[in-house]
Amino acid sequence: MESHKNPIVSSEEQIENYSIYYEKYNKAYFLFTNHVGIKDKREYTDAIWVYWAKDINKWNPENKAVVLDSFNCKLSKIIGLPSVVQVGKRLAYFMMVNLTLENRLISKLIWNETLD
């Protein structure tokens, strides 16, 4: 694998803390990452995004989607630290969420079937 001197995507994307998963079925890499939002002049992780690429050394910032944010996850407005692990034929998505009413962090786990 090549060594990168530049970020995977532009700093304008406002991302941090990522986890990469390779799907053998479609030969694609998926990069799950925090999106850093700005509200009231403060930065916070407001979403988990996923980028995809066929070449781990070439990421197009247009190839992305929102996994979780405050619109599709009513549990929290602060979401982050995504991880993805394959367990058998399923994927486990882990992330941290801040319960806004109780002001405490919890881990969230979501399962999904793989494509192969």
Image (cartoon, helix red, strand yellow):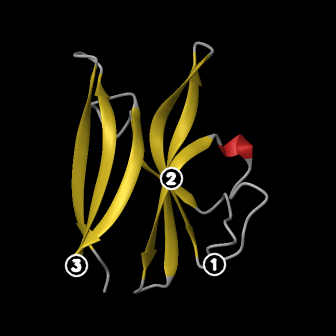
Q: Earlier in the sequence, mark 1 or mark 3?
A: 1
Residue density around tag 2, few if under 14, some if 14–19, many if 20 or more, within 10 Å:
some
Residue visible at 72% across and 42% down in the picture: 12
Q: Nearer the viewer, mark 3 or mark 2?
A: 2
Q: Earlier in the sequence, mark 3 or mark 2?
A: 2
Residues under labels 3 and 2: Cα distance?
22 Å
Residue density around tag 1, few if under 14, some if 14–19, many if 20 or more, within 10 Å:
few
Is 96 or 76 nearer to us in this picture?
96
Q: Residue 9 bears which disc, if any?
A: none
Residue named by callout 2: 18
From what the image shows, is residue 20 above or below residue 43? below
Residue visible at 58% across and 12% down in the picture: 40
**Quadrant holding the N terminus:** bottom right
Residue 10 visible? The answer is: yes
Q: Do the residues bearing badges 1 and 3 touch, measured as CB atoms within 8 Å?
A: no
Locate residue 87, reporting x and y percent: 22, 72
Locate residue 55, reporting x and y percent: 63, 78
Residue named by callout 3: 89
From what the image shows, is residue 112 above or below residue 99? below
**Quadrant holding the C terminus:** bottom left
Which element carries disc 1, helix, strand or loop? loop
The answer to which quarter of the image holds residue 72 is top left
The answer to which quarter of the image holds residue 92 is bottom left
Residue visible at 41% across and 39% down in the picture: 80
Is 12 or 104 nearer to us in this picture?
104
Relative placement, left or right, of 65 versus 8 is left
From what the image shows, is residue 32 above or below residue 15? below
Locate residue 99, reporting x and y percent: 26, 24
From what the image shows, is residue 14 above or below residue 22? above
Residues under labels 1 and 3: Cα distance?
23 Å
Residues under labels 1 and 2: Cα distance?
17 Å
Query: Label 1 amino acid?
Result: Asp
